[in-house]
Image (spheres, helix red, strand yellow):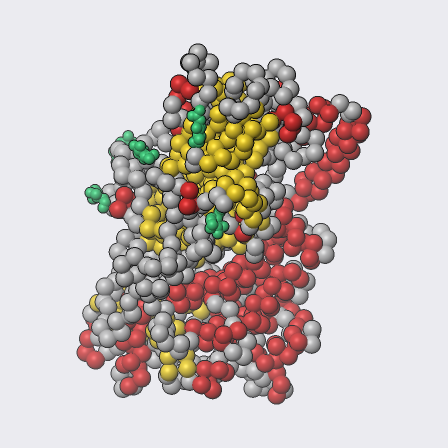
């Protein structure tokens, strides 16, 4: 809705002006406070994801959680599956978010585009519902961001109960990723995810340290897990009623001696926020400050006692504790003084709220760092009580709100002592845990894995191809001819018949079966079956109606030129396929022959990588490369691999860079008919790019259609792929990310044509695009033609 947005900006202005005018007129500070009280925070990133759902889900509170897109997901060894609760057992009293889940059999990653760096809330919803096929209560898995371990070997509650894990993590780049890694032999699952921007100044860098007493600095570098958030003495506050979508629980269950406390509350309208802005309703809404627990009016002999809250805590971690105070109990100033203790240690001696806030009913809060060394018996004790030495009136003590946040440790973890890279940070390791956890076992290259592959008889193949009728030939490769086959039910097949006299043919035949039989992915051509009867080497694949990508770029196939968006989507699909190949299986696989004739398009122009005859298992962890005779196609060959005969995944990345330029320029990788400097596309494109003359060689069909920002991002990605040295090239995951971004930039222009410069446009998408942001929910782009973005779903 481009026009609508412009209007919105136009009509905003008078409102802002009149508000300013109002503020200028307002002399009463209370008025200023009530204006402040209506301060609204609009998160620049607001991803609400209902995992495994097929449609979006609206909660009773109005929030809409979008389904995570099917299309961009992984299959095969790193299979991800959407499952729903068995209807007979689904607990309908829990949120509808808990009725579906996404299940992961292998390490899988959601990535979210972040428009503005800074702290973000991550909320993870787990509910191990009953499901006939997957036993979710048996799941054991680790969840981490790019640099923080959130959960280590996590197991959901059994019997199932709904759990929300809430984190505040700093994000510095343009994305945040969430990786789910099942423990070997187990599975992982997730019901719903929130990734939401938090205000910059929500949490300061420092807090008062209890032990050793002083100041603790560096909070902003740490990730936090919200362990408890209590509206002391008040009602539960649900997300829609909070200024920042937080949930505040009641405190009653944590009182050590419930009879020692009584609740007190006033109208929220009486709550004031300090004029200096040191506390705002974003810190805590007035509903938190307008209620409190105070000392119970028990006419006990001893008026001195503490109110004590006791909460379970992990003694291996330090905590950040935020206490909210607001004097809603006194009738006059300077009558309330009390002590605050944490874990039995003095946190504040003689807290004098009225002198701190210069008024009654003014919001105040204080942060404390609680050292792990002070946590005994796995509990945190928070106490308030009168100062026995103070001579003031009636002894009393209050607390209005309490937040307990776990701080990440030196391993960058909020759960255990393992870092994201698997390294152990526990000093003397318990038992024999090594410093590095070495994942997985290699690919058994020797044995043929026939698991998913159907064995055809020669007679069936003959029938399907009309006895290898030359009229049915749809392609010819090094391995042999490819025929169009038709099964009885009308299903079309691509049937590749090898030349039995070729030694290389036999090897490639075996490699292809080995590789493809264990790989299943939306962006890899599926091997359906094979036939080795009578010395024949026949492979049967799914039929790709639109043939090789190359035919859609140039040449005489007669296809209409692909739009820029279609090209991006094809490249993204192929990149996904390769990314899966490199990272998806237990040991990565290097394709070795990435080129536009090996990227096939199905009837919906979905790209699939084909031809695994030259593929090799990637180097294992101990190796840096695989030494091998150089294979591949001229024009796409990684020069470093050619020189050193050492193969890594980065050789595929190089070839893919050539593909990217081929797609952009619509010319072949090698064209000997051209002047010498132009023969090799990779060299020519890089030369033009360096001179800033790339527009000279772009496919004329694209000129004027590509958004400059999208082109810039795309070329940047392509250029990096062609770096001389493999180590300087990005991973396929990074390439994929940049292509997604390029697509998003292009989409933005299509949604807001003719606005501003390209950079402004890029900014515009990031900040405001109504489709990608805000209530419409989650990020980036899926690989469907659907323009609505979904999280980029990557395996690793
Ligand atoms: C799960 O995915 C399949 C397609 O893979 C779809 O047909 C089905 O509706 C999905 N189920 C749910 C509950 O979303
Ligand atoms: C549960 O599903 C079965 C079939 O799957 C159906 O017959 C039955 O009516 C469903 N029950 C409810 C309560 O929806
Ligand atoms: C599911 O797994 C849990 C934990 O391993 C086990 O106790 C339970 O019996 C399993 N349930 C079923 C239905 O298999
Ligand atoms: C306050 O205390 C009263 C009396 O004990 C109780 O009935 C009420 O539920 C409490 N209110 C809250 C919000 O805890
Ligand atoms: C209140 O708690 C503190 C810290 O645990 C303790 O030192 C103090 O004696 C307690 N006060 C009373 C009156 O029990
Ligand atoms: C805990 O104590 C240790 C040693 O005294 C100190 O290095 C560390 O910074 C403290 N951490 C916190 C959160 O207070
Ligand atoms: C430790 O916790 C247990 C269970 O909560 C409690 O029974 C025990 O008294 C506690 N010990 C100390 C020293 O606080």
Q: Position of residue 574 (x, y in %)?
A: 46, 65
- Give the quarter of the image for residue 517: bottom left
Can residue 524 be seen here? The reply is: no
Residue at image location 35% in from the left, 28% down from the top: 93
Residue at image location 62% in from the left, 85% down from the top: 677
| Screen quadrant of the C terminus | bottom left
Nearest the eye: 566 or 349: 349
Residue at image location 62% in from the left, 70% down from the top: 699
| Screen quadrant of the N terminus | top right
Q: Residue furthest top?
A: 299
Nearest the eye: 714 or 583: 583
Residue at image location 47% in from the left, 63% down from the top: 733
Whether residue 431 is situated above or below residue 654 in the rendered picture = above
Q: Position of residue 475 (x, y in %)?
A: 39, 75
Q: Position of residue 590 (x, y in %)?
A: 39, 73
Q: Position of residue 726 (x, y in %)?
A: 49, 76
Whether residue 237 is situated above or below residue 758 in the rendered picture = above
């Amino acid at each position: 809705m481009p026009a609508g947005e412009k209007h919105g900006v136009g009509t905003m202005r008078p409102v802002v002006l009149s508000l300013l005018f109002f503020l200028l007129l307002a002399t009463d500070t209370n008025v200023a406070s009530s204006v402040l009280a209506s301060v609204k925070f609009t998160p620049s990133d607001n991803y609400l994801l209902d995992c495994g759902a097929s449609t979006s889900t609206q909660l009773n509170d109005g929030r809409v959680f979008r389904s995570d897109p099917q299309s961009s997901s992984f299959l095969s060894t790193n299979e991800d599956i959407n499952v729903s609760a068995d209807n007979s057992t689904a607990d309908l009293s829990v949120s509808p978010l808990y009725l579906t889940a996404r299940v992961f059999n292998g390490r899988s990653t959601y990535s979210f585009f972040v428009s503005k760096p800074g702290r973000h809330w991550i909320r993870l919803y787990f509910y191990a519902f009953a499901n006939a096929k997957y036993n979710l209560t048996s799941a054991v898995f680790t969840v981490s961001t790019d640099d923080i371990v959130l959960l280590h070997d996590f197991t959901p509650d059994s019997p199932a109960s709904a759990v929300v894990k809430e984190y505040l993590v700093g994000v510095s780049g343009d994305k945040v990723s969430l990786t789910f890694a099942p423990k070997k032999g187990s599975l992982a699952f997730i019901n719903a995810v929130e990734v939401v921007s938090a205000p910059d100044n929500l949490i300061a860098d420092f807090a008062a340290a209890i032990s050793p007493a002083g100041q603790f600095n560096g909070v902003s570098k740490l990730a936090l897990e919200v362990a408890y958030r209590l509206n002391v003495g008040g009602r539960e506050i649900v997300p829609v009623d909070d200024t920042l979508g937080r949930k505040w629980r009641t405190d009653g269950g944590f009182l050590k001696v419930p009879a020692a406390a009584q609740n007190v509350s006033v109208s929220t309208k009486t709550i004031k926020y300090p004029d200096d802005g040191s506390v705002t309703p974003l810190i805590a809404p007035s509903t938190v400050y307008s209620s409190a627990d105070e000392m119970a009016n028990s006419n006990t002999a001893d008026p001195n006692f503490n109110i004590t809250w006791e909460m379970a805590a992990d003694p291996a971690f330090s905590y950040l504790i935020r206490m909210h105070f607001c004097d809603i109990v006194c009738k006059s100033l300077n009558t309330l003084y009390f002590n605050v203790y944490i874990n039995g240690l003095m946190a504040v001696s003689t807290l004098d709220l009225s002198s701190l806030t210069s008024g009654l009913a003014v919001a105040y809060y204080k942060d404390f760092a609680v050292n792990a060394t002070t946590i005994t018996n796995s509990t945190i004790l928070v106490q308030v009580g009168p100062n026995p030495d103070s001579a003031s009136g009636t002894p009393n003590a209050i607390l209005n709100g309490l937040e307990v946040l776990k701080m990440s440790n030196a391993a960058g973890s909020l759960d255990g002592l393992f870092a994201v890279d698997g390294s152990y940070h526990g000093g003397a390791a318990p038992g024999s845990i090594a410093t590095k956890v070495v994942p997985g076992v290699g690919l058994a290259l020797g044995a043929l894995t026939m698991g998913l592959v159907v064995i055809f008889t020669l007679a069936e193949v003959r029938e399907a191809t009309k006895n290898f009728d030359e009229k049915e030939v749809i392609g010819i490769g090094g391995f042999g001819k490819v025929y169009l086959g038709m099964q009885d039910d009308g299903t079309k097949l691509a049937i590749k018949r090898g030349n039995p006299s070729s030694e290389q043919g036999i090897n490639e035949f075996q490699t292809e079966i080995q590789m493809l039989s264990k790989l299943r992915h939306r962006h890899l051509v599926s091997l359906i079956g094979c036939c080795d009867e009578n010395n024949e080497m026949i492979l049967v694949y799914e039929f790709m109606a639109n043939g090789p990508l190359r035919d859609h770029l140039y040449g005489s196939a007669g296809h209409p030129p692909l739009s820029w968006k279609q090209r991006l989507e094809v490249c993204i699909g192929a990149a996904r396929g390769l990314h899966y190949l490199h990272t998806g299986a237990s040991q990565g696989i290097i394709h070795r022959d990435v080129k536009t004739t090996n990227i096939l398009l199905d009837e919906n122009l979905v790209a699939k990588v084909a031809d695994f005859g030259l593929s090799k298992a990637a180097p294992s962890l101990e190796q840096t490369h695989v030494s091998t005779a150089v294979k591949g196609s001229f024009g796409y060959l990684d020069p470093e691999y050619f020189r050193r005969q050492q193969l890594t995944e980065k050789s595929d990345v190089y070839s893919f860079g050539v593909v990217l330029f081929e797609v952009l320029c619509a010319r072949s990788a090698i064209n000997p008919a051209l002047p010498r400097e132009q023969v090799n596309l990779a060299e020519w494109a890089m030369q033009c790019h360096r001179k800033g003359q790339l527009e000279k060689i772009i496919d004329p069909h694209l000129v004027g259609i590509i958004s400059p920002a999208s082109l810039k991002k795309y070329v940047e990605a392509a250029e990096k792929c062609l770096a001389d040295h493999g180590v300087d090239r990005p991973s396929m995951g990074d390439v994929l990310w940049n292509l997604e971004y390029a697509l998003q930039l292009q989409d933005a222009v299509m949604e807001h044509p003719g606005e501003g410069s390209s950079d402004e446009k890029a900014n515009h998408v990031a900040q405001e695009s109504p489709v990608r942001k805000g209530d419409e929910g989650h990020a980036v782009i899926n690989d469907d033609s659907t323009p609505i973005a979904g999280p980029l779903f990557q395996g690793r």
